[in-house]
Image (cartoon, rainbow, N blue to C red):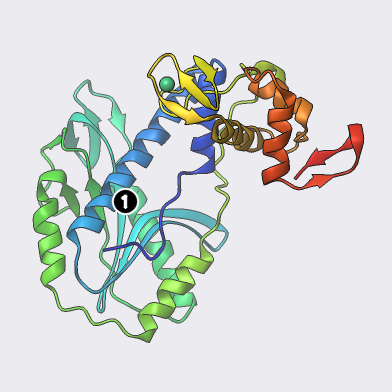
Amino acid sequence: MKAYKTREEPKQLQILELLDVRMELPEDKKRYYLSLKKGYEGESMFDQQIEEKLHNNCYVLNDLLLQFNNTTFQIDTVLIFGNMLRPFEVKNYEGDYYYENDKIYSSSGREIGNPLNQLAKTESLFRNLIHSHGFSLPMSANVVFINPEFSLYQAPLNKPFIFHSQLNRFFNQLNEQPSKLTDMHKQLANKLASLHLNESPFQQLPTYRYDMLKKGIICATCRSFALVFVGRNCVCKECGHVENARAAILRSIWEYKLLFPDRKVTTVNIHDWCQIIDSKKRIKRVLDEHFEIVGVRQWAYYV
Ligand SMILES: [Zn+2]
C-alpha cells in the first residue's frame, strides 16, 4: 500500500548527520542523534512493511505532527480503514528486555520508558482532535517493535504490542477485514495531512558556528572527506564512489543552506565551504544555474 502522506527525514536528523561528520558532537547530543537515527530507521522499516504487505482499502499516513489544546504530539503511522482508525507507535529497540510492573527494563536493569504510556496520551489527544473536526471512528492503537533482534520477556498477553515475528499475521488480519472507504475517510485523510506541522518543537541541536565546522565536500555514500576531482567527476578515495562534480557541489550548497539558513550564499562563501574546488568559476556556474542572484558585484548573493 502506497502512503497517502509520506515520511520525510526530519530536518533535525539531517542537520545532526551533517554536524556529526564536521565536528565533535557533545556526548549527550551524539547519543540523541543516534537514537533519533535509529528511530527513523525503524519507522522507515515499518513504512516498507506496509507498502509490501498491506493490500486492503485504507489510507496510510506516515509521521503526523499534530497539535491539540496547545499540546504537540507525534504519531508514527496512522491507518484509516472503513470502520477503524489505527495509530501506531514504532519502536526500534534491539536486544533483550523484560517487562515488570508495567515498566520495561533492559537486560542490564536500566529502565526505559514504557511506550504504552506515550501511546495512551497520544491516543487520547488524537481522539479529541478528530472529534473537534467532526469526525468519529473507533480507534485501536498499537506499539510495533519493528526490530527482529528485540525480545521482551514477561510481556503481558493483553497489551497492544506487535512484535516483528507477528507482523505477517497482523497484516494478513488487516487485509482480511472488510473495509469500505467513503468520501468521509478521504476528508479525514486530507484534514490530518493538512494539520501536520512541519517544524518539530522538540529541537535539540547543539550550538555550532561556521568556524567550528570542518569544511570540504563530503562523500555522498561514506561521508568521508577523501574526495578528489577527476575531470568532471568527484571520486572518493575511501569507498570509490563517483559523483558528478556539479552534483557534489550542489549537494554541498544544500548542506550549507540547511546548516546556516542565515548565512549568505555567495561564490566566495561556497568556495570556502567546499574547499576542494580550485576554480571559483565552477562554483559560480553551479550557483548561476540553480539559484537566483540578488544584488550586484561584491554585494551579490544567491537565494
Ligand atoms: Zn566515500
Q: Residue furthest bottom?
A: 183
Query: Is 11 situated above or below 105?
Result: below
Image coordinates for residue 205, horizontal then vertical, percent: 58, 31
Amino acid type, label 1: Glu
Q: Position of residue 60 (x, y in %)?
A: 33, 64
Query: Which quarter of the rendering shows the C terminus?
Result: top right
- Label 1 crowd (10 A; few <14 / some 14-19 / many >=20): many
Q: Which sits in the foreground, 225 or 65?
A: 225
Q: Is residue 260 left or right of residue 117?
A: right
Residue at image location 55% in from the left, 57% down from the top: 197
Q: Is residue 209 visible?
A: no
- Would residue 273 appear left or right of 113 to someone viewing this image? right
Taking depth in this image into account, of 173 and 1 the one nearest to the observer is: 1
Question: Label 1: which residue?
Answer: 89
Ligand 1 location (quadrant): top left
Q: Quadrant of the N terminus?
A: bottom left
Q: Would you say 70 lies left or right of 183 here?
A: right
The residue at 10%/50% (across/down) is: 166
From the viewer's perspective, tell me whether residue 273 is left or right of residue 7. right
> Observer-nearest residue: 94 or 45?
45
Q: Is the C-beta of the residue carrying label 1 under 8 Å from the nearest atom of ligand 1?
A: no
Residue toward you, 253 or 99: 253
Kindly identify the residue that appears in the image at 44 percent across and 26 percent down: 242
